[in-house]
Image (cartoon, rainbow, N blue to C red):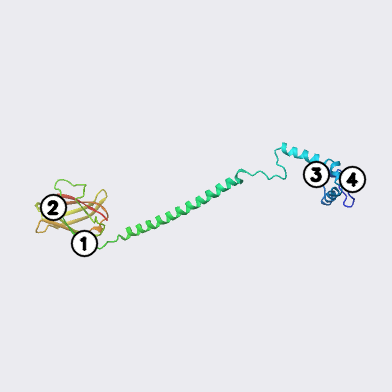
Amino acid sequence: MPAVPQSMPMDREFILRNQIPERYLAGRLPIRGAQDFERYCREHPGLIDEIGLAERVHAGLRLLEAGGVSSPWEAPTRKWWEQLPVMIAALVLACVAAIAAMVLWGKLAGRDATIASLQQAVAEQPLQPATSTRTVRLVPSRTAPSRRAAVTLGSNGAAQMADLKIDMSWSKFTAFRVTLDRQDQGRVAVLNYMLRDSNGDLRVSLNSTALGPGIYEFAIEGLTLRGEAVAQAWMTIGIAH
């Protein structure tokens, strides 16, 4: 197909001879040629009917419709993720996720602070000063240890200095060994060669915050002259903070 001369005037014969409408619709005209053709059609509108441009355009639109392609002036069909309801739902979901993340972060920060405080308390093991003294007289069991606490110390939430008087007046021994175990955990202390007083009592005084909350079992053994231990009695106390 010959190129359109830049200097040749645009007229009817030139347009028909060089198939200008077909080349214009196919987009093969140079810019100057397309402008001249448009100007000529604007000055001679009857040429549009003569060359059947409207029928050609309608035929092209029918082809687009048959091929499932939208018309040039119609907005292109959006993908499902570009539709407004989907975008709004995604925005709402993002906001909810951001709020949930902030709430979770706040809870984690509070939990970390609590854990750090508890770890510090465990490391320091603070001993609270006793605000009161409680005298407790106990009669231990002579047959077997009990898992139930005979008395609970520190139950009012304040530190107490507990003065335990353990009745051992019935025993033939005067020196004793007292073993203190935390129930289901392990040994806490062993007190050797404890002597009962003139009333026949073993005296044990302790701060209720010196021991962690739980159940504690006392095992009392009599000591012979050779230092041999003979089981005598058992008792159980509870510690509350």
The answer for how far apart the CA atoms under marks 2 and 4 are is: 135 Å
Residue beneath disc 4? 12
Could you say which is closer to the camera, residue 204 or residue 28? 28
Residue shown at 88%/43% (left/top)?
A: 16
**Residue, disc 1:** 132
Residue 50, image x, y percentages? 86, 41
Q: Nearer the viewer, mark 2 or mark 4?
A: 4
- Tags 3 and 1 in contact by the CB under 8 Å rule? no
Residue beneath the point at 45% across and 54% down: 105
Of residue 45 and residue 231, the one placed in the foreground of this image is 45
Indicate which disc, 3 or 1, sits on the residue closer to the N terminus.
3
CA distance for labels 1 and 2: 32 Å
Which residue was labeled with disc 2?
222
- Image quarter of residue 200: bottom left
Q: CA distance from mark 4 to mark 3?
A: 17 Å
Proximity of marks 4 and 3: CB atoms separated by less than 8 Å: no
Q: Look at discs 4 and 3 and give the one toward the viewer.
A: 4
Residue 162: x and y in percent read 20, 58
Q: In screen coordinates, is 35 left or right of 65? A: right
Q: Residue at x 58, y 45 (%)?
A: 85
Residue receiving disc 3: 25
Distance from Cα at disc 1 to Cα at disc 4? 121 Å
Q: Where is the N terminus found, in terms of image quarters?
A: top right
What residue type is disc 4 on? Arg
Where residue 120 sits: x, y (%)?
Answer: 35, 59
How many C-alpha atoms fall within 10 Å of the one at disc 4: few (<14), some, or many (≥20)? some
